[in-house]
Image (tube, rainbow, N blue to C red):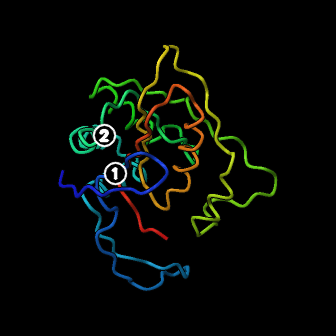
Amino acid sequence: MQVAVRALAGNWDLGYALDKHIISSVYLGKDEHGHDRFDNTRSEPGEALFKLKYRNDWMQVQPLAEQLRISLLPLLPDVGLIVPMPASVERPRQPVTEIARELGRLANIPVFETMVVKTAAPAGAPQLKNLTSKDEKAAALAGRFAVNDVVTNAGQWNALLLDDLFYTGASMEAVCAALRTYPKIGKIYAGAITQGRIS
């Protein structure tokens, strides 16, 4: 898989994505329902992620996890555990959780799927998908993530916080802030399959 690793800026110690999600996009006009149409050319990780998330092609999990192991883990010193980002959309199987499990298996690193949980939105709160700016999303996400004490060993570990598609980083920053309150977490690294357009 061809990648072009990109640094991710945020409140974590280090962060990287395998590549941009979309390399080029050509506007094709509106469809019969008035929706904009685009001809998108995705990066190789972007195409694999698209097939996984939107075509339920679970065969993409292993190559994506292997690429994370090869391209990102060497950039992140002493990862002790992996934490998948809580999903924003309910699915029977969560792509980011499946990738985290496979990466943990390949790299022999424990994965803690329930370390971070998303709490219910207050009544009347706007849906994240309807918010456009990072500041709006950050305000809506403040205090929405809780950390469970699931590490039974004494000590402190560096955590890889893993997401599939990184846009503004508001959700990842909110989870990172929550993880900073957990005494068993040392450094926090952000990892993503792809980076989308930053708004």
- Which residue extends farthest bottom? 29
- Discs 2, 1 touching: Cβ within 8 Å: yes
Mark 2, residue position = 76
- Viewer-proximal residue among 49 and 198: 198
Q: What is the quadrant of residue 157 in the picture? A: top left
Q: Is residue 137 left or right of residue 6?
A: right
Extreme-left residue of the structure: 2
| Residue at image coords 54%, 42% | 91
Q: Is residue 7 above or below residue 52?
A: below
Q: Is residue 82 above or below residue 199?
A: above
How many other residues sit within 10 Å of disc 1, few (<14), some (14-19) or many (≥20)? many
Real-space Cα separation, disc 2 to disc 1, in angstroms: 9 Å
Q: Quadrant of residue 103?
A: top left
On the image, the x and y values in percent for residue 138 come to: 62, 58
Q: Secondary structure at mark 1?
A: strand
Give the vertical position of 132 relative to 164 (above or below).
Answer: below
